[in-house]
């Protein structure tokens, strides 16, 4: 659908198209991601082999990667939040990776999706902090050792800083996915447009094609890295909520 | 996942594995963590995003308060500056960690 005309249409790939009324391609790929994750964990762990096979290794590596991250960032007591972080990490990872398949839709490229995920993290982290520390949580907004006279300035600044986590967390994932897919589409369109220019064009098209090959590799890195960053920031926020400093 | 130390073995499997990994140099520094903060580009983009998002939240609160109280542009101006300050605070924490508040060493790397 890239270059029917002579224009570069980089954004149509993010358009939602309803499969059934109220159920879009975005929803479909969310279900695919959830299904693939479940299949990986359930089928992968079925053999319960001492020496794991390929699928079981993958499942174990995924588990240990997230478990290590939670333990390192939040601490041993943070393992109660492991299911949440694991779900979040695998969902975003599979969303990003599914988006790398040709013709697939990247549901993490919509701010509505990433903002909702960030909001879930934010609400959970705040709820955890209040559940553990009660009213003491609000002391978070006035660091120790700050003169009382400074409180009218420091408290709003701290509250804005706290609230801005939702924005930065969601925009980071959303912007990375959009930017990457737009770049891929733009260079892919260059290949098609140049290819239509005859023999010299075909030779010229080799450059954007080579670049796109590199970009695809880079996008796989970004797909993993952004899922990792989202998960590790969640862990850091959980650490702040549990230890409150 | 930690194996208990087995009888007759001086160390647990995890410890021997760690020793082997250290010998092979598999856990060099920067192997874990770092993320996108590792490259100057990533760090710069992250810092910019932190400022922008804090500003956006500040402006959002300001506009909401103004709309509610009918005092446009009072709170917009006030929270624009507070948002900017929060953005600087975010970047400060991104680079230096949470400072005096604790020892969260994972932040500033």
Image (cartoon, grey):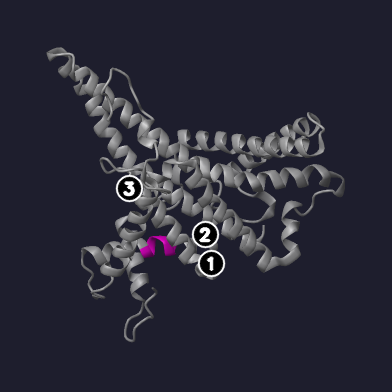
Which sits earlier in the primary sequence, circle 3 or circle 2? 2
Distance from the alpha carbon under mark 3 to that under mark 1 = 27 Å
Q: Are marks 3 and 1 in contact (CB under 8 Å)?
A: no
Q: Residue at x 29, y 26 (%)?
A: A187
Mark 2 sits on what residue?
Answer: A73
List x then y, in percent, for residue A117: 51, 52
Q: Are discs 3 and 2 both within one chain?
A: yes
Relative to A197, say whether A172 is above or below. Answer: below
Distance from the alpha carbon under mark 3 to that under mark 2 = 25 Å
Is A8 left, or right, of A198 in this rendering? right
Chain of the residue displaying label 1: A
Residue B26 in view: no
Is B104 left, or right, of A191 in this rendering? right
Q: Nearer the viewer, mark 3 or mark 1?
A: 3
Viewer-closest of A79 and B96: A79
Looking at the rendered structure, the number of numbered marks drawn on it comes to: 3
Is B63 left, or right, of A204 in this rendering? right
Q: Quadrant of the N terminus of chain A?
A: top left
Chain of the residue displaying label 3: A
Viewer-closest of B73 and B38: B73
Q: Are marks 1 and 2 in contact (CB under 8 Å)?
A: yes
Residue closest to the far bottom = B7
Q: Are discs 1 and 2 both within one chain?
A: yes
List x then y, in percent, for residue A131: 66, 67
Residue segment shown in magenta = A63-69
List x then y, in percent, for residue B20: 31, 64
Q: Residue at x 45, y 41 (%)?
A: A110
Mark 3 sits on what residue?
Answer: A97
User: Which of the labelled discs sits on residue A78, or is there none?
Assistant: 1
Q: Secondary structure at mark 2?
A: helix
Q: Residue at x 22, y 17 (%)?
A: A194
């Amino acid at each position: 659908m890239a270059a029917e005309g002579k224009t570069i249409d980089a954004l149509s790939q993010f358009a939602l198209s309803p499969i059934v009324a109220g159920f879009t391609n975005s929803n479909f790929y969310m279900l695919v991601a959830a299904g693939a994750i479940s299949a990986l964990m359930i089928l992968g762990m079925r053999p319960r082999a001492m020496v794991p096979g390929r699928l079981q290794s993958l499942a174990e590596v995924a588990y240990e990667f997230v478990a290590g991250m939670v333990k390192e960032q939040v601490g041993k007591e943070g393992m109660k939040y492991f299911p949440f972080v694991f779900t979040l990490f695998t969902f975003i990872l599979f969303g990003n990776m599914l988006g790398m398949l040709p013709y697939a839709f990247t549901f993490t490229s919509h701010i509505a999706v990433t903002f909702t995920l960030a909001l879930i993290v934010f609400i959970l982290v705040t709820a955890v902090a209040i559940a553990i520390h009660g009213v003491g949580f609000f002391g978070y907004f006035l660091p120790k050792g700050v003169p009382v006279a400074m409180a009218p300035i420091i408290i709003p600044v701290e509250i804005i800083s706290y609230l801005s986590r939702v924005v930065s967390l969601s925009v980071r994932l959303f912007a990375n996915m959009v930017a990457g897919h737009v770049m891929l589409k733009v260079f892919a369109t260059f290949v098609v447009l140049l290819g239509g220019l005859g023999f010299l064009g075909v030779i010229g098209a080799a450059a954007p094609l080579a670049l796109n090959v590199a970009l695809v590799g880079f996008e796989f890195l970004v797909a993993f890295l952004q899922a990792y960053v989202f998960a590790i920031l969640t862990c850091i926020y959980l650490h702040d909520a549990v230890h409150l400093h | 996942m930690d194996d208990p130390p087995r009888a007759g073995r001086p160390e647990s499997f995890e410890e021997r594995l760690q020793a082997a990994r250290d010998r092979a140099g598999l856990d060099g520094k920067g192997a874990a963590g770092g993320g996108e903060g590792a490259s100057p580009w990533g760090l710069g983009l992250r810092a910019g995003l932190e400022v922008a998002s804090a500003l956006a939240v500040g402006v959002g609160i300001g506009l909401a308060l103004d709309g509610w109280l009918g005092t446009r542009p009072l709170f917009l101006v006030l929270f624009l500056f507070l948002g900017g300050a929060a953005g600087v605070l975010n970047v400060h924490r991104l680079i230096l960690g949470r400072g005096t508040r604790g020892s969260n060493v994972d932040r500033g790397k």
